[in-house]
Amino acid sequence: MSAESPISPPTGAPGRRKVDSRASERASRSWWDTDSDEYHRTHGEFLGVRSPLGEFVWCPEGLHEGDVHLLGDVVGKSILEIGCGSAPCSRWLASHGARAVGLDISMGMLAHGRRAVSASTGPAPSLVQASAEVLPFADATFDLACSAFGAVPFVADSAGVMREVHRVLRPGGRWVFAVNHPMRWVFPDDPGPAGLTATIPYFDRTPYAEFDPDGVATYVEHHRTIGDRVREIVGAGLILTDIVEPDWPEWLDREWGQWSPLRGQIFPGTAIFCCEKPR
């Protein structure tokens, strides 16, 4: 998310402007294809991309699935990861006995995942290129679904993603996804003192976008309030069982974009929504 003010920007400038599903999808695919190498140079070690069996880190606060078990028992379960990037989470799930499928819109990110799978001796997840808004799977295919900062903030129709997840889950299935905490939207995208002052309306759902000189969106991130997320979940027929807001751990002195020890000690940076499909 950016610190730009909530006004319509001139063509080619970043700021707030409505962007539909098609433009958001095109921007995300292009952005992550282009940025995948730099992203992995910067964040790959923290995310466990180079770990032989992957790692499952939910958020910049370092919350690990092996410690918190938000997905429950994964052994023998069919699990879909939405917005898997280079799939360290899917690889970790596969190494812990799951039948994992990682889905991402970016071939550049998936290429990093395929290289990691090829270099590993552990069980390999299946990797699929597709949009989260139209999941290419039959009804009731998966026992669990998850997303660690993947896809949900970058699609225009996140309510549609919830409906798609409901469709592909089996009855009793669990859906857990992590996103920027919605309250972060009101603060400038700055890990330092300047990022502690609220400047942007929380209730303005106009997405943040960056554009090329021709006015084509090159990066898009969509904001939803806590209430919006709850309504999306419930409206899809899912049951919300928990919202996890990770504390900033004492051991972590790493900054990641807007995430920092300074901000993390004052307000949450991540919201993890835990949901279930009724039996």
Image (cartoon, rainbow, N blue to C red):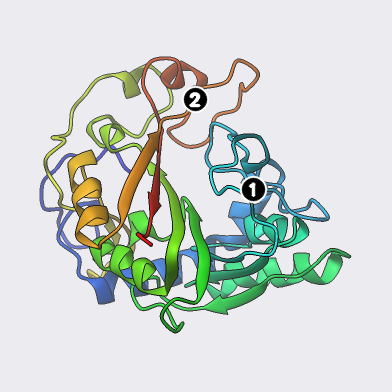
Labelled disc at residue 239: none
**Mark 1 element type:** loop
Question: How would you rate the neighbour count of disc 1 (Cα within 10 Å): few for under 14, some for 14-19, many for 20 or more?
Answer: many
Please determine whether, in this image, residue 216 is positioned above or below residue 250: below
The residue to which callout 1 is attached is 56
Residue located 27% across and 29% down the image: 187
Please determine whether, in this image, residue 108 is positioned above or below residue 233: below
Residue located 35% across and 34% down the image: 189
Q: Which kind of residue does numbered mark 1 sit on?
A: Phe
- In percent of width and height, residue 263 lies at 41, 20
Residue located 62% across and 75% down the image: 127
- In percent of width and height, residue 176 lies at 45, 51
- Residue 67, by quadrant, is top right
Residue situated furthest front in the rendering: 279
Whether residue 44 sits left or right of residue 145 in the image: it is right
Q: CA distance from mark 1 to mark 2?
A: 20 Å
Whether residue 191 sits left or right of residue 239 in the image: it is right
Q: Quadrant of the C terminus?
A: bottom left
Whether residue 84 sits left or right of residue 51 in the image: it is left
